[in-house]
Image (spheres, rainbow, N blue to C red):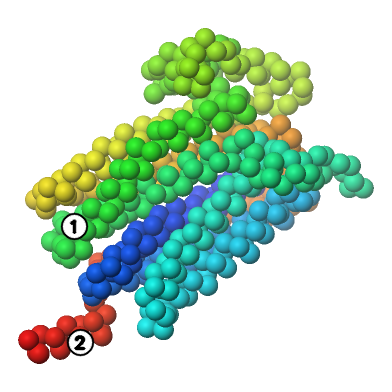
């Protein structure tokens, strides 16, 4: 019944639910753009049906993503009022920009996709698909700006007010484009593209497994597997870029992620276990791998857990200035170990579909139907490692989490709302899953006018 812990759990629950739908909607948006592009080039009624199919799935996912994200905005004023008072002048700007420049762009042109097929030109409709998708990417960019500032604050100064200290903006560009913004954004968007690719792969595999909509399925498999494969390959350098930026700005997080107790060159861990009692890590690792990847030098020294903890104790920083070691270490390993699964699955899906050799591989198709869960888990592991790894800070080296929580909201009320949010969000998720499952089972449907046009052409012939 600790208010700070419950507030953290509540925010974690809401953001996990929300972030189930954000990568899905942006990833599906990429597939939608490609589907509409194909229809614009071919004018084939079946290609229009494919585009309409993705519009329906995108719309359902986007709507739930918006609904599940609203409560997080309110949480800043209820559970995290001290945080809002301290960073409101800085943190509020990207959140407001996300709503004004991104959400309205998405919503306006999504209305064109839903209602405007017969009311606007094909060119305008196609441009609208791009604007919807670019709006979602822009929305993600503003959120990444806000989060990156919390991870590596820049372009600010702390002033004293009548109610205490607060951070104020001094340089917008320094704050927005701090050391970690671009690497984090590229890493996140690439993960989202992998998600979109595997969503297409999973749906295509379902149709091929049941021998339905095979023409649509083969085309979708080609697009989805290609996107997933290219984005998975790109993840290696982009993930490295993100890791290096974290190494430069958050050495405590890197020490926890790799279980590095002693100061020195950092190993690149694959799997392992941290023995916090005896202060040892048992890790299958590439010796000095992180140091070499960061500086091309196996002798570069970085602070270890013991050194960081000793300095934190002198400065009065709680928890040794370190996140929960075992949890941070293991969820990061989960993200790393899922990477080869995605790469291999995408490669074989692409290769066998290209050879038109997927239809009879029932076991592999059944596996592919579940592959959208792989990038989704990897994304959740990655975000959890990034955010938990920032602890005990809400704003790194600037505002402790214990000082960011609201001081007037009792733990009992947070617990009640946590239970309520969990129940409501579960209901919303089940409703979304049922609606989207029905859409997938039904599959792409030819529009009535396209069907009539095809029949008329047949009669004339």
Decide: few, some or many residues near mark 1? Use Cα within 10 Å; few <14, some 14-19, many ≥20.
many
Can residue 295 be seen in the rendering of this structure?
Answer: yes
Assign the C terminus to one quadrant of the image: bottom left
Q: Is residue 383 above or below residue 432?
A: above
Front position in the image: 423 or 293: 293
Task: Kindly identify the residue that appears in the image at 92 percent across and 48 percent down.
Answer: 162
Q: Earlier in the sequence, mark 2 or mark 1?
A: 1
Task: Kindly identify the residue that appears in the image at 42 percent across and 49 percent down.
Answer: 192
**Residue 131 location in percent, x, y?**
48, 65
Decide: few, some or many residues near mark 2? Use Cα within 10 Å; few <14, some 14-19, many ≥20.
few
Residue on which the image places disc 1 = 218
**Residue 198 location in percent, x, y?**
31, 50
Numbered tag placed on residue 171 in the rendering: none
Task: Kindly identify the residue that appears in the image at 56 percent across and 51 percent down.
Answer: 141
Q: Secondary structure at mark 2?
A: helix
Q: Is residue 275 above or below residue 460?
A: above
* Quadrant in which residue 2 is drawn: top right
Q: How far apart are labels 2 and 1 at the CA level?
A: 26 Å
Q: Is residue 210 above or below residue 55?
A: above
Front position in the image: 371 or 171: 171
Assign the N terminus to one quadrant of the image: top right
Front position in the image: 422 or 303: 303
Q: How many marks?
A: 2
Numbered tag placed on residue 452 in the rendering: 2
**Residue 147 location in percent, x, y?**
61, 44
Q: Secondary structure at mark 1?
A: helix
Q: Is residue 461 above or below residue 420?
A: below
């Amino acid at each position: 019944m600790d208010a700070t812990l419950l507030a953290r759990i509540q925010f974690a629950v809401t953001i996990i639910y929300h972030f189930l739908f954000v990568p899905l909607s942006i990833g599906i948006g990429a597939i939608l753009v490609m589907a509409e592009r194909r229809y614009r080039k071919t004018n084939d009624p079946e290609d229009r049906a494919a585009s309409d199919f993705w519009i329906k799935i995108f719309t359902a996912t986007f709507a739930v993503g918006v609904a599940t994200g609203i409560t997080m905005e309110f949480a800043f004023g209820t559970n995290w009022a001290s945080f809002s008072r301290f960073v409101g002048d800085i943190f509020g700007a990207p959140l407001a920009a996300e709503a004004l420049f991104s959400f309205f762009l998405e919503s306006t042109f999504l209305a064109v996709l839903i209602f405007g097929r017969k009311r606007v030109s094909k060119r305008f409709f196609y441009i609208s698909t791009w604007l919807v998708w670019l709006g979602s990417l822009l929305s993600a960019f503003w959120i990444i700006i806000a989060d990156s500032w919390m991870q590596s604050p820049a372009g600010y100064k702390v002033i004293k007010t009548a109610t205490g200290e607060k951070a104020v903006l001094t340089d917008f560009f320094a704050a927005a484009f701090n050391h970690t913004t671009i690497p984090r954004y590229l890493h996140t968007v690439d993960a989202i593209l992998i998600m979109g690719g595997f969503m297409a792969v999973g749906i295509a595999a379902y149709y091929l497994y049941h021998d339905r909509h095979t023409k649509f399925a083969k085309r979708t498999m080609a697009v989805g597997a290609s996107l997933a494969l290219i984005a998975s390959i790109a993840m290696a350098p982009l993930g490295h870029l993100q890791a290096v930026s974290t190494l430069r700005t958050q050495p405590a997080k890197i020490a926890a992620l790799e279980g590095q107790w002693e100061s020195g060159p950092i190993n690149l861990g694959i799997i392992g276990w941290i023995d916090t009692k005896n202060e040892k890590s048992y890790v299958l690792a590439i010796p000095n791998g992180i140091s070499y990847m960061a500086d091309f030098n196996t002798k570069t020294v970085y602070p270890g857990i013991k050194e960081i903890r000793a300095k934190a104790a002198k400065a009065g920083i709680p928890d040794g200035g370190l996140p929960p070691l075992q949890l941070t270490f293991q969820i990061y390993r989960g993200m790393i170990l899922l990477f080869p699964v995605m790469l291999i699955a995408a490669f074989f899906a692409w290769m066998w579909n290209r050879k038109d050799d997927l239809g009879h591989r029932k076991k592999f198709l059944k596996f592919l139907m579940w592959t959208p869960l792989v990038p989704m888990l990897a994304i959740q592991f990655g975000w959890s490692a990034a955010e938990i790894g920032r602890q005990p800070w809400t704003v790194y080296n600037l505002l402790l989490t214990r000082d960011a929580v609201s001081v007037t909201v009792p733990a009992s009320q947070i617990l009640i709302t946590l239970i309520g949010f969990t129940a409501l969000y579960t209901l919303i998720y089940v409703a979304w899953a049922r609606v989207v499952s029905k859409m997938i089972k039904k599959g792409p449907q030819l529009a009535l006018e396209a069907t009539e046009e095809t029949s008329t052409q047949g009669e004339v012939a």
